[in-house]
Image: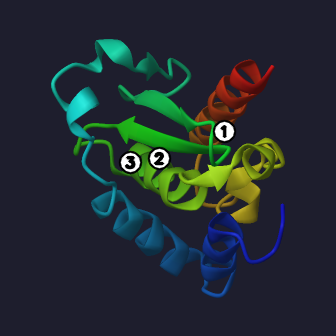
Amino acid sequence: MTTGTPLARIFEEFQSVGEQQRLMLLLDYAKRLPELPGAYRDSLQDMDEVVECQSPLFLATDFDDAAEVAHIYFAAPPEAPTTRGFASILQHGLSGQSYEAILGVKADVGSHLGLARVITPLRLRAVNAMVGRISRSVRDHVG
């Protein structure tokens, strides 16, 4: 991962505080998950379900081939703050980034956030599944 990218800055933000503050920061990100754009707001059928998550989570990736960037959108219920937090981190950190930058992200986001000791392994696998889905979507698109 390239330093200075939005996701790298989020990792630094989490690493700069203690474990309990990281949980609070994750919940803060949950509150900042952006609304879905109109194309997805009315129907989740056009989004992919991330079945590895315990809570319902839907993902869409749109591509701007002229700029070679991907735009990422998530839908997660308010009663799933951990899932929403991870989705928000990935949306803030990866949406609008180049295909190359997204493909360079490793699936160990939970450890980069410093949450491995305070979040269950099942939830860490879920965030890694989100990264895997995003990467696969970009890889399939660029061929």
Q: Position of residue 66 (x, y in %)?
A: 62, 42
Q: Is 41 left or right of 75, judged from the image as shown?
A: left
Q: Looking at numbered disc 1 in the image, what kind of residue is underneath it?
A: Val
Toward which corner of the image does residue 127 lie, by quadrant?
top right
Q: Is residue 28 above or below residue 56?
A: below
How far is the residue under mark 1 from the one under mark 2?
A: 10 Å
Helix, strand or loop at label 2? It is helix
Q: Position of residue 54 (x, y in %)?
A: 44, 27
Q: Looking at numbered disc 3 in the image, what kind of residue is underneath it?
A: Arg
Instruction: State which tag comes first along the sequence, 1 or 2.
Output: 2
Q: Residues within 10 Å of mark 2 (few under 14, many from 20)?
A: many
How far is the residue under mark 3 from the one under mark 1?
A: 14 Å
Q: How is the image coloured?
A: rainbow
Q: Position of residue 61 (x, y in %)?
A: 51, 32
Task: Determine whether label 1 and label 2 are within 8 Å by CB.
Answer: no
Which residue position is annotated with label 1?
Answer: 131
Helix, strand or loop at label 1? It is helix
> What is the residue that sits farthest to the left in this orientation?
42
Which residue position is annotated with label 2?
Answer: 87
How far is the residue under mark 3 from the one under mark 2?
A: 5 Å
Which residue position is annotated with label 3?
Answer: 84
